Amino acid sequence: MGKIRASIIGITGYTGIDLLRLLLLHADVEIAYLTSRQHPREKIGNVYPHLAHLPLEITDTAPAEVAKGSDVVFLALPHKTAQEVAAELHGRVKIIDLSADFRLDDASTYAAYYEEHKYPNLLKEFVYGLPETVGRDKIAKAQSVANPGCFALVSQLLLYPFKGKIAQADIFAVTGSSGAGKTPVDGTHHPVRNHNMKSYNINKHRHIPEIIRAGGIDAAKLNFVPTSGPFTRGIFAQAFITLSGEAGDASAAYKDCPFVRIQKNVELAGIVGSNFADLSFETGTGGRVLAQGAIDNLVKGAGGSAVQNMNLMFGLAETAGLFNLAPLYP
């Protein structure tokens, strides 16, 4: 097999540009198209000067034309916008969608947390792309994959080892400002955020349906407190879990997962810039577990998982292009 021709539709947001960084490091990938409606016919370096050395050009190529020249298309588009493009691409090319539009396979659940889905018939056509919980075989056979949400991903990793045994889970998760996207608004603009912490969408966050699915619980058994933190990249999460059964060896759930590292101490400085998820589990008395986790929201929480899924879809080693992507330290 020759190199995988990969395209990114929606290149100019933080998710798209970090995904491009990862694809450029992948020995089995060549870039086919980078598209954006806002910056057509511009060199990538004109939009992002740190990429001034690259000869790559942004285009506004139609999705159907992108599909013809690609083996896989990554959708790094805003929620709702991805629906139309995914519908046009479906069946023509392999798709990995980084938006929230196809993460839930039930139209009524999607409507409850987002709005009415325009293409409910496509929801079950997408495989949820979290290899550590869904299984690699399903992703390997998929033509269309929905990438997990970043909060959802780390929270699922904390709950998954105890699936079916959770009486109550309380999760407090702090995310960096890059998770709010490229466009600054009053609530997320870094000059305010860099000396502030605040919680938002408590028990109403759109990632809740993903989290409870991995934990085998309903929303009534989860308190989820997403919080904005005074840093740029990463998510640090703590889950206080009460079990209805024995905890067992939580680390055993990830014995064949190359990007999950069980650590004594979890910290953002240990994972930023990488595709690793660092986890720790401490079992207390009375069926209580304290689980902690950290991921880079733009890598393992977005582009890194997307590349991991691509590797599986094309029969490559799951770690290809990612395992040697060491965390940025200090």
Image: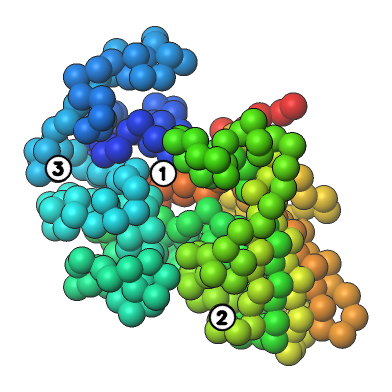
143 above or below 297? below
Name the image quarter holding residue 216.
bottom right
Numbered tag placed on residue 307 in the rendering: 1
Badge 1 vs badge 3, beta-carbon distance below 8 Å: no
Mark 1 or mark 3: name the one nearer the start of the chain: 3
What kind of element bears circle 3? Answer: helix
- Rate crowding at label 3 as few (under 14), some (14 to 19) or many (20 or more) other CA atoms within 10 Å: some
Instruction: Give the foreground label among 1 and 2.
Output: 2
Marks 1 and 3, how far apart at CA: 20 Å
Q: Which residue does the image show at 54% across and 61% down from the upper left?
A: 152
Q: Which of disc 2 and disc 3 is earlier in sequence?
A: 3
Q: Residue at x 33, y 68 (%)?
A: 115
The residue to which callout 2 is attached is 219
Which residue lies at the image location 29% right of the left edge and 56% below the top edge?
80
**CA–CA distance in space, label 3 to label 2:** 37 Å
Q: Is residue 241 visible?
A: yes
Quote the CA–CA distance across marks 1 and 2.
Answer: 30 Å
Which residue is tagged 3?
A: 63
Amino acid type of the residue tagged 2 in the rendering: Ala
Q: Residues within 10 Å of mark 1 (few under 14, many from 20)?
A: many
Q: Position of residue 214 (x, y in %)?
A: 54, 73
The amino acid type found where label 3 is placed reads Pro
